[in-house]
Image (spheres, rainbow, N blue to C red):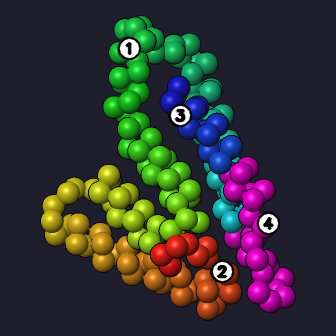
Amino acid sequence: MGEIVIGILLILLSAIIYFNSGNFQQLNETHLDPGSYPKLIASLLALFATILLIKKTIELVREKSLGFEGGMKKYLLTQWNEYKFVVLILLTLGLYILLMNVIGFMVSSIAFIIITGLIIGPRKKKNIMLISLISLIVTLGMYYFFENVLYVRFPDGILF
């Protein structure tokens, strides 16, 4: 049942990404505009989410069981334990998107990668340092590539 909800949410997210990716500023005339890649990724996300939705719906119909046998509280606790990382990452992603225009791409991306790494991975001191280094390298690399090769501008916030 949880996969069906996630599939629907992913289809909605892909629609939002697809229809909002045409608003990127273009610095020069090219055949592909800055929104072409996000539209491609959003289309693939919608396709795979639709496949997931169809597959899980067929499985649910075959089982004819919704999982409420032990009561709603037990069902919700089971769903939370199974999908807590997905929910936490989606909340972090939503916060990242909201804060990107406020504090800027660089700071919000570095913070997003570090927080996501801490949610998913172990919390040893050496891993925090490694996650921080990776987030810095990935963010600076993406920034350089998109700004200087693809000529796509990132949101500037109050920090960077």
Badge 2 element: loop
- Residue bearing mark 4: 22
Residue 105: x and y, percent? Answer: 53, 72
Q: Residue 73, which numbered label?
A: 1
- Residue bearing mark 2: 153
Check contact, mark 2 vs mark 3: CB within 8 A: no
Q: Is residue 47 magenta?
A: no
**Three-letter amino acid code at the position of disc 4:** Gly
- What residue is rendered at 38% in x and 38% in y? 84
Mark 4 vs mark 3: which is more N-terminal? 3
Badge 4 element: helix
**Three-letter amino acid code at the position of disc 2:** Arg
Mark 4 is surrounded, within 10 Å at the Cα level, by few (under 14), some (14 to 19) or many (20 or more) other residues, namely: some
Whether residue 73 is visible: yes
- In this rendering, the answer to whether 29 lies above or below 22 is below
- Residue bearing mark 3: 3
Check contact, mark 3 vs mark 1: CB within 8 A: no
Q: Quadrant location of residue 125?
A: bottom left
Q: Is residue 26 magenta?
A: yes
What's the distance in space between the residues labelled 2 and 4, CA to CA?
14 Å
Check contact, mark 2 vs mark 4: CB within 8 A: no
Badge 1 element: helix
Check contact, mark 2 vs mark 1: CB within 8 A: no
- What residue is rendered at 64% in x and 37% in y? 8
- The magenta stretch is 14-37
What's the distance in space between the residues labelled 3 and 1, CA to CA?
19 Å
Residue 140: x and y, percent? Answer: 46, 83
